[in-house]
């Protein structure tokens, strides 16, 4: 499976950090540092930062995304934001199924699928997160868990729509813990995801699919992880809040 067919994507996930003013200042810091990137650069920010982030990133190679969206276009869902609302703002990307959404906010494989469907219907590009808990890895069922999550999330997704999906492998045990899968472990699971997609959509679609690694990638380990044949970028947490560190990761992908 030819890595040269895929353009790397480095996406920051700011989580619940940064006020609008702080978001603008951080993006201003980042812009010159990533201006020559030979990869796609995305920053997924809290809802309250979206407008400020898009204004700060305008005219640069940085694209802005949201961290979640609801599956309904409108309705009695207090505190939620729809994919249509993101579309109306001009937001092109959205993260769906992040492990923290699954772990803390009751997200299930089925609700992930519904959110993916809504985002695609609104014309957004989806960063779809999949990954196993530590107990599941220790039980030796990582591949089965990730394949199941992938298959359910892609239910009803056409081959054409798949072109607007990026899959991020996020081992839950490595999120925010400082622990990282070895480069070989990351590549092994990313490859399993690609094989699974190939079974659903064919080899050509699988070869074109961008599969990121998203478990505590940082400036120190990015080069080794991104050198793996099935690791096409990263979904970056804490390091995306530091302009210098984020630019090192972008440089490694370039």
Image (cartoon, rainbow, N blue to C red):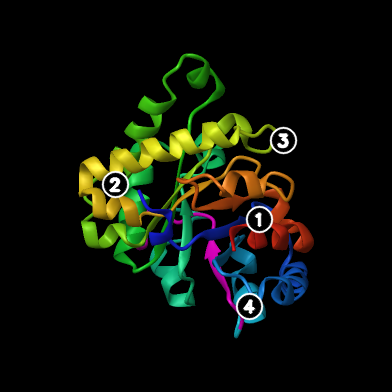
Nearer-N-terminus badge (2/1): 1
Instruction: Residue at the far bottom: name it.
Output: 59
* Start-end of magenta stretch: 60-74
- For image coordinates 60% across by 29% down, the residue present is 173
Q: Nearer the viewer, mark 3 or mark 2?
A: 3
Cα gap from disc 4 to disc 2, whole angstroms: 31 Å
Residue 72 in sight in this render? no
Q: Earlier in the sequence, mark 1 or mark 3?
A: 1
Q: Answer with mark 4 or mark 2, whichever residue precedes in sequence.
A: 4
State the image quarter where residue 160 is shown: bottom left
User: Can you identify the residue that label 4 sits on?
Assistant: 57
Classify mark 2: helix, strand or loop. loop
In percent of width and height, residue 117 lies at: 30, 55
Disc 1 to disc 3, C-alpha distance: 16 Å
Q: Earlier in the sequence, mark 4 or mark 3?
A: 4
Residue topped by disc 2:
154
Secondary structure found at label 4: helix
Crowding near pointer 3: few (<14 within 10 Å), some, many (20+)?
few
Question: Quick one: label 3 or label 2, which is nearer the N terminus?
Answer: 2
Q: Residue at x 56, y 69 (%)?
A: 38
Tag 3 secondary structure: loop
Q: Which one is closest to the eye, mark 1 or mark 3?
A: 3
Of labels 4 and 3, the one closer to you: 3
Does label 4 or label 1 sit earlier along the sequence?
Answer: 1
**Residue under numbered circle 1:** 14
Single out the residue that lies furthest toward the top: 139
Q: Is residue 215 toward the left or the right of residue 68 in the image?
A: right
Q: In this figure, which residue is indicated by the disc labeled 3? A: 178
Name the residue rendered at 53%, 61% in the picture.
66
Residue 233: image location, x then y, percent? 53, 54
Which element carries disc 1, helix, strand or loop?
loop
């Amino acid at each position: 499976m030819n890595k040269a067919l895929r353009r790397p994507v480095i996406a920051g996930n700011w989580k619940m950090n940064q006020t609008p003013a702080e978001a603008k200042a951080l993006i201003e810091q980042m812009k010159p540092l990533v201006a020559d990137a030979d990869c796609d650069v995305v920053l997924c920010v809290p809802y309250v930062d979206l407008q400020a982030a898009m204004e700060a990133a305008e005219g640069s190679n940085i694209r802005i995304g949201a961290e979640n969206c609801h599956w309904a276009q409108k309705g009695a869902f207090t505190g939620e934001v729809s994919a249509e609302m993101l579309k109306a703002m001009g937001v092109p990307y959205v993260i769906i199924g992040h492990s923290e959404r699954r772990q803390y906010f009751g997200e299930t494989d089925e609700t992930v699928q519904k959110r993916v469907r809504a985002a695609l219907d609104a014309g957004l590009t989806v960063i779809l997160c999949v990954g196993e808990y530590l107990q599941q890895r220790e039980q030796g069922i990582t591949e089965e868990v990730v394949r199941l999550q992938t298959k359910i999330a892609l239910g009803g997704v056409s081959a054409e729509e798949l072109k607007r999906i990026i899959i991020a492998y996020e081992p839950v045990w490595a999120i925010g813990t400082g622990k990282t899968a070895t480069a070989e472990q990351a590549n092994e699971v990313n490859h399993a995801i690609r094989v699974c997609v190939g079974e659903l959509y064919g080899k050509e679609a699988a070869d074109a699919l961008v599969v990121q690694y998203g478990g505590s990638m940082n400036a120190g380990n990015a080069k080794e992880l991104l050198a793996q044949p099935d690791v096409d970028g990263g979904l970056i947490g804490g390091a995306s809040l530091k302009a210098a560190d984020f630019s090192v990761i972008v440089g490694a992908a370039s």
